[in-house]
Amino acid sequence: MVEKLRSIWMDGKLVPWDDAKVHVLTHSLHYGVAAFEGIRSYETHDGRSAVFRLRDHARRLLDSSKIALLNCPYDEETIVEACRATLIDNGLKEGYVRPVVYIGDGVIGVYPGDNPIRMFIAVWKWGAYLGPDAIKKGIRAKVSSFSRYQPNSMMTRAKLTGNYIGSVLAKREAKSLGFDEAILLDVDGYVAEGSGENIFIVRKGRLKTTPLTSILPGITRETVMTLARDMGLEVEEQRFSRDELYIADEAFFTGTAAEVTPIREVDGRPVGKGGMGPITQRLQSAYFDAIRGRAPKYADWLEYYEIPTPAAKESKRPAKAQT
């Protein structure tokens, strides 16, 4: 459950948490057309706080909005500063950031007319997405009976709320069968992605991941590919089949929420030796170094912010009048 905090940014200003409301006739609530992002901030090794690849997320939010014909009223810099302000106002040294651009109330019907385009940014505390043991021990995954939609049926490069209906169904199916996560195939039967993650496999020392023909261009996916190539690893963007996944030496998910999570089993078959493999471990370690500010080479991925101390807040208050 999301823990209630102080405020949420709505349409250009911070409002009290309980006052952040939308009307029941909000168009996006009825038809699923809204762009959103999942972003994380971390407390770095030196005690500061930084949002990971915030500007990349802001740009992808605007790209998704453009694809969905959502004329976002805010530019990249405004979104970046609003995310920082929301984290600061809620006193979060690290946490999850969720900006959403959506169609407000007005016309109800598939065509939204000139309904206003609105935006909010919420933040909350969030730990390990797939469970506290998943990062080290890995997870059990199930190939879903639900397929990833094809590019011409839904806009696959956009992060839109309605695109996740299949993900919700796939995840619920996997959990009901005792698995931790679902793996969706594309309409041609090749491995696409998890319910909310990109997927990688390792075979004979080479890294392979699904190409961007029918999947979301994950920011963590691109981060891991950069880290891998900088390590001298060979990275291929190539379709692979379900049975190639079964015989992979290693497999793992990537995502803002999932970070770098090993897959230890697929459909009852152990992946490799049934735990985290050595390449996954190297990439996971490098990723955690980057997000915690321990890798100077990737310092430009971090957007720092500062939570004022109680003493600093007190010093900004106007002095009491002398009597």
Image (tube, rainbow, N blue to C red):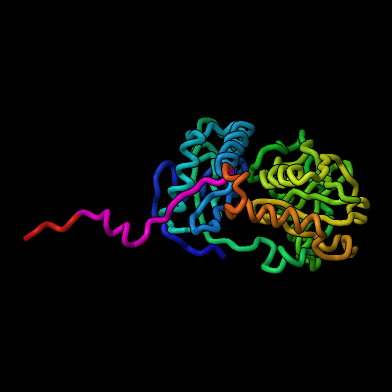
Q: Viewer-proximal residue, 36 or 43?
A: 43
Q: Would you say residue 303 sits in the magenta stretch? A: yes
Q: Is 191 situated above or below 180?
A: above
Is residue 141 among the parts visible in the rendering?
Answer: no
Residue at x-position 51% and y-position 35%: 76
Estimate the x, y position of residue 268 in percent, counting from the top left: 89, 65
Q: Is 11 situated above or below 181?
A: above
Q: Viewed as shown, does residue 286 lie left or right of 29?
A: right
Estimate the x, y position of residue 107 in percent, counting from the top left: 52, 36
Q: Quadrant of the C terminus?
A: bottom left
Is residue 184 among the parts visible in the rendering?
Answer: yes
Estimate the x, y position of residue 60 in percent, counting from the top left: 61, 38
User: Which residues lie in the magenta part?
Assistant: 301-318
Residue at x-position 73% and y-position 43%: 230
Estimate the x, y position of residue 136 in percent, counting from the top left: 73, 65
Residue 34, picture quadrant? top right
Q: Viewer-proximal residue, 270 or 147?
A: 270
